[in-house]
Image (tube, grey):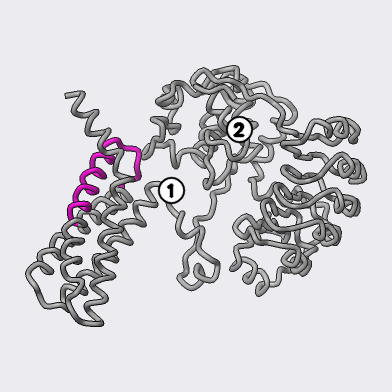
Amino acid sequence: MVFFDELLGFLGRFHPLLVHLPIGILLLAFVMAIRIQFKGGDMYLPAIKLSLFLGTIAAIVAALSGYLLSRNGGYEEDVLSYHKWLGIAVAISSLLLWFLYRKESPGAFRFWLFFILVLLIGVTGHYGGTLTHGKGYFVEAMPVALKKLFKAEEDKEEVLIVQNAQEAEAYMGIIQPILKQRCQSCHGQRKQEGGLALDTKENLLKGGENGTVLNANDSKKSELYARLVLPEGHKKRMPPKGRTPITADQIKLIAWWIDQGANFDKKVHEIPQTEEIAHLLKKLERGEKEVSAVLYADLPAAPALPKDKVDAWQAKGIKIIQVARDNNFVLVNAINYPQFNDKDLQELLAIKDNIVQLKLGNTAVTDLAFSTFSAMPILSRLHLENTKISDAGLSQLKGLSKLTYLNLTGTKVTSKGLSKLNELPNLKNVYLYKIVNQEVAAIKQLNAKIKVDTGNYSLPFIETDTIRF
């Protein structure tokens, strides 16, 4: 009996492969049905019959494998229910259509039934994608103009605020809310990827398929923490790509809780705290959104944003994100517009007094962009990783007195360019992954206040790992 249950679970894993067969076959049949409906003739009729027969079988097999997969649990019940019954409706409709085309029924009725079937396939696929990628995955990638047209809005992220953090229970009041906000969409009551749930103390201590994730007093040996600090792009990094990333402050709080014994009962003030941790806990009382306002409190008030220009940029895929509710400072992110170039950057000068962060990694900007950067007086964080920039433009950054963060990973910058970084008065963090050996000496010549991360470090080996990196 155990073998039979295991076999059914194994067969269910084929659902992601099998589910695409009926989609392709039935859509091909529909294209041929359109040809017959509007052009006449019956040349494609035998092919439609065969496609419907094969598509019906494929739809039934896909529905069965989907049911077997759903028995493993870990999915949101409401979404799973919609996906399951719509899948069954697709299989039944396909079977009915096969009979109608086989019996030479009147063309108009069967064609419009076919049209309904195609709509069912689309809606079923949408719920299947929601099960895999989470709610909102479709809407979040929709162009701004379409969001407004269909009045579709992304779910607003809940702000984590803790009243009187020092009196809160460390686990229930600080750590569990962070896990709920950042982790439980994949590791919660309804879905447990890797067999791991983080919704209760018992599940957290139990761990997942690969063993425990919590090693009290040692965060580096705890997967709960170690997975959070893996490099971006690493297949084991959590949260995975496409999910809302956990913040650096939240990671530090998780590490603090683990290193201090991972106690589930003590209040915050009963656990030793460094000055940094005490500050982070204080920030929780204000709320993360307010922290952004505090961070830029010393800057002059920013002018109102030009709505027409912002809408045009967002329609292109250039994200313009306000860093706080009570000011007009913005983060500009071109991650969804890789063709972003020097000309696009010049257009952003219309909001130069609003931009505090620029994320231009993996775009088409060149050294010509630096003259534009220098005209942005309050720019504090600049991402240029994997772009074509080189030493030629770095000297023009010296006018950016507010710049604290600079990412030059994967660029052509050499020791000659690095020497120019000392001219930036407030620069604190520079990222230079994949730097060549001859540049190491140049790094040592930088101002002591500048922390350079070259990526040349080894990751802690966790007992459940099968590969040492």
Q: Amino acid at mark 1?
A: His
Residue 441: image location, x then y, percent: 87, 30
The residues colored magenta run: 56-77
Earlier along the polypeptide chain: callout 2 or callout 1? 1
Regarding residue 265, the answer to whether it shows in the image is no
Q: Amino acid at mark 2?
A: Leu
Q: Which residue is nearer to you in this view: 267 or 311?
A: 311
Q: Is residue 110 left or right of residue 77?
A: left
Q: Eyeballing the image, is 363 above or below 160? A: below
Q: Which residue is nearer to you in this view: 199 or 308?
A: 308
Return the residue at label 2: 230
Return the residue at label 1: 133
Judged from the image, the secondary structure of the residue bearing numbered disc 1 is helix
Residue 23: image location, x then y, percent: 29, 57
For label 2, count other residues whose C-alpha is less than 10 Å away and answer few (under 14), some (14-19) or many (20+): some
Residue 30: image location, x then y, percent: 26, 68
Q: Is residue 34 left or right of residue 156?
A: left
Q: Is residue 267 left or right of residue 212?
A: right
